[in-house]
Amino acid sequence: AQSVSQHNHHVILSEAASLELGCNYSYGGTVNLFWYVQYPGQHLQLLLKYFSGDPLVKGIKGFEAEFIKSKFSFNLRKPSVQWSDTAEYFCAVWGYNKLIFGAGTRLAVHP
Amino acid sequence: DAGVTQSPTHLIKTRGQQVTLRCSPISGHKSVSWYQQVLGQGPQFIFQYYEKEERGRGNFPDRFSARQFPNYSSELNVNALLLGDSALYLCASSLGSGQTKSPLHFGNGTRLTVT
C-alpha cells in the first residue's frame, strides 16, 4: 500500500537554527515526491518537487530536499529558519492520479 | 490571476443533513480534485475529475459524490452527514490529470462542522 510517514509531528526551533524534517514513503512505482507548506490561514503551497535527475532538489524560500532511494526517504532541510517559516509542512507522493500525504509536521519558530 | 476559489469558507450542519461544497479552478485548468483534511492528519484524496469525467475515487463511502461542470467548476456533495465528516475540504486544480505535467494548486478550503 502507498503511504507517507513523517517522523515529527511538532518541531520547535529558535530563529537561525537548522531544520530537517523527515519523510519516508512506501510506493512501488515511479516516484514523484513533494513537500507542501501551509502557513497559518493560507492554502497549501508547493515548496519543491522531485520527479527525476539530481536527488538534491532546491525549492522556494531557501528550502531543499534530498531523495535517497535506498532509504525511501525525502527529507526537507533549511540551513537557517526564520520566524516566518512557522507553518505546517506536508510530504506527499504522487500515485494513481492522487497525492498521498503524510500527517504533517507543525513547525514553530521562536524569535 | 485568481487562484482556486472555494465556497463557502465555513459551514455548520447537523447530523443527517446534506451539504454541497463548490470549487472554481484556476482559469485554464481542466482537472479538479477534492481532499478531506481532518484535524491532525494530512489531506486524504476523495475524487479527481478531468474534462468532466471522474478519473479517480478515494476510499470514501457512497455518501460522497461530486461532479464537474462544462466550465470546469466542481461540486462535492455529502449526504447523511456524520460527526466524523467534520473536516477541512480542499479543492485543487491542475492543467492536466497527471501531477507530472502540472502541479496541484489548492484553494483555502471549506471548514465543515457537523454537530
Image (cartoon, coloured by chain):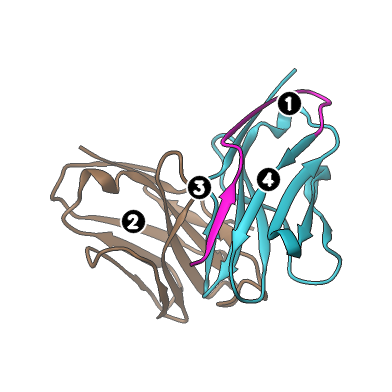
Q: Residue at x 37, y 58 (%)?
A: B22
Q: Are marks 4 and 2 in contact (CB under 8 Å)?
A: no
Amino acid marked by disc 1: Trp
Distance from disc 1 to disc 2, alpha carbons, whole Å, reads 34 Å
Q: Name the residue under label 3.
A: B108
Where residue A81 appears, as percent x and y from the top left, is: 79, 31
Which residue is denoted by mark 4 in the rendering? A22
Name the amino acid, label 4.
Gly
User: What subunit carries mark 3?
Assistant: B
* Residue bearing mark 1: A83
Disc 4: which chain?
A: A
For marks 2 and 3 on the same chain, the one whose residue lies earlier in the sequence: 2
Q: Position of residue B59 (x, y in %)?
A: 35, 65
Identify which residue is drawn at 68% across, 60% down: A72
- Rendered position, B60 above or below B37: below
Q: Which span of residues is magenta-colored?
A: A1-18
- Give the mark, 1 or 4, whose residue is nearer the N terminus: 4
In depth, the one of B26 and A86 nearer the eye is A86
Q: Residues within 10 Å of mark 1 (few under 14, many from 20)?
A: some
Residue wearing tag 2:
B21
Q: How crowded is mark 4: few (under 14 residues within 10 Å), some or many (20 or more)?
A: some
At mark 3, the secondary structure is loop
Q: Residues within 10 Å of mark 2 (few under 14, many from 20)?
A: many
Magenta stretch containing residue A19, yes or no?
A: no
Q: Is residue A3 magenta?
A: yes
Amino acid carrying mark 2 in the image = Leu
The colour chain A appears in is cyan
> Viewed as shown, does residue B42 lie left or right of A29?
left
Q: Residues within 10 Å of mark 3 (few under 14, many from 20)?
A: many
